[in-house]
């Protein structure tokens, strides 16, 4: 099998190293890492044994020379990784058939190795500690802070003051802003008895964690799944989301379709009259990318297998009122879902 990769995480998976200006070429059993002189030393130190390193200012031309010299007639590329300009430069003048295979690398990575699972467990473990540290610092010190400042402080805790990279920019949303699944910070200030949604993660040796908690702001702030709200409506919605979250994790099995896991949670939310307010899929794969395969959605035909890692994150979002989402990342092990980071 012959293939070209340009995405950093795709290349890292093959080489153990990547840079922001590189192309990986796989030709049968041979592997080539093409980059420019800025990364020559790092590439030699970082790439796995057996990967040939090629230093060239013009990555596309170097890749073309490899294809020509090896008399390659067919090669796979992921159209998501190459711009139209890159593809035109690559294909121009070549008598090569390019097979477009969307998510090519993610398909290879969909079943995690034992080493990857351990890395993802560590990411989740540190993510859990960061959540707890952030929650413990909220009351009373952060009361009156707006979402901008809360998000900044969440980043400090998630990164352990710069030790780790973040999986993505954290979502820290109060009350009505939490009704937006991908909320961005506002001037809204945090007060007692508010609802606060936190969706965040960190990277451990490039592998991501992802977790969401919806918490009640009182004098006993914590990130446990047991939350107590003064508002009956908030309590009702939270309990429905929690039931959907717990049921999907408890009933997930290897051998079922991913859509069945989505259905477990969605049916519970619909039965309680909130179906129109659950506006996204139940989950997504997590690994080197924060969103990767498998897709855990109502339309996904993917068959769940041991070694897959993905999120379970049901939510209910009531416009202009509040939103609740609860998310954990799970690994399929011995046919069942096991929460990472517990």
Image (tube, helix red, strand yellow):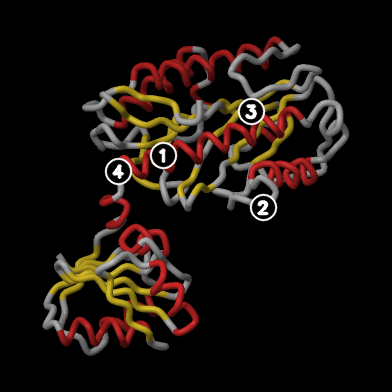
Q: Position of residue 254 (x, y in %)?
A: 25, 27
**Neighbours of disc 1 within 10 Å: few (<14), some (14-19), many (20+):** many
**Neighbours of disc 4 within 10 Å: few (<14), some (14-19), many (20+):** few
From mark 1 to mark 2, how far is it between C-alphas? 27 Å
- Total numbered badges shown on the rendered structure: 4
Per the image, label 1 sits on a secondary structure element best described as strand
Tell me if label 3 and label 4 are in contact, CB under 8 Å: no
From mark 3 to mark 1, how far is it between C-alphas? 20 Å
Of residues 45 and 276, the one nearer the viewer is 45
Residue ID at (39%, 41%): 285
Mark 2, residue position: 162
Quadrant of the image occupied by residue 127? top right
The numbered dot on residue 284 is: 1
Query: Is 135 situated left or right of 240 in this image?
Result: right
The numbered dot on residue 262 is: none
Quadrant of the image occupied by residue 190? top right
Q: Earlier in the sequence, mark 3 or mark 1?
A: 1
Of marks 1 and 2, the one in the foreground:
2
């Amino acid at each position: 099998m012959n293939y070209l990769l340009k995405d950093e995480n795709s290349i890292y998976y093959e080489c153990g190293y990547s840079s922001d200006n590189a192309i990986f070429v796989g030709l049968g059993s041979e592997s080539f890492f093409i980059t420019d002189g800025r990364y020559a030393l790092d590439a030699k130190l970082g790439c796995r044994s057996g990967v040939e390193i090629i230093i060239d200012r013009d990555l596309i031309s170097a890749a073309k020379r490899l294809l020509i010299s090896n008399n390659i007639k067919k090669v796979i590329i992921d159209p998501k990784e190459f711009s139209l300009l890159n593809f035109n430069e690559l294909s121009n003048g070549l008598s090569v058939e390019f097979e477009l295979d969307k998510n090519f690398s993610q398909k290879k990575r969909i079943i995690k190795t034992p080493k990857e699972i351990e890395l993802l467990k560590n990411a989740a473990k540190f993510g859990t500690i960061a959540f707890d540290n952030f929650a413990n610092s909220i009351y009373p010190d952060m009361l009156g802070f707006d979402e901008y400042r809360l998000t900044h402080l969440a980043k400090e805790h998630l990164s352990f003051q710069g030790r780790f990279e973040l999986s993505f920019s954290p979502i820290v949303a109060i009350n009505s802003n939490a009704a937006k699944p991908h909320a961005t910070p506002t001037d809204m200030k945090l007060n007692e008895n508010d609802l606060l949604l936190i969706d965040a993660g960190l990277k451990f040796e490039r592998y991501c964690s992802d977790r969401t908690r919806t918490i009640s702001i009182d004098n006993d702030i914590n990130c446990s799944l047991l939350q107590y709200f003064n508002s009956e409506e908030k309590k009702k919605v939270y309990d429905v989301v929690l039931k959907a979250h717990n049921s999907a994790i408890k009933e997930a099995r290897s051998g079922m379709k991913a859509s069945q896991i989505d259905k477990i949670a969605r049916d519970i939310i619909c039965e309680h009259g909130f179906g129109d307010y659950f506006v996204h899929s139940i989950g997504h794969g997590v690994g080197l990318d924060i969103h990767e395969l498998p897709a855990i959605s109502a339309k996904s035909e993917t068959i769940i297998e041991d070694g897959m890692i993905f999120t379970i994150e049901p939510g209910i979002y009531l416009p202009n009122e509040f939103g609740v989402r609860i998310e954990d990342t799970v690994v399929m092990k011995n046919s069942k879902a096991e929460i990472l980071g517990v």
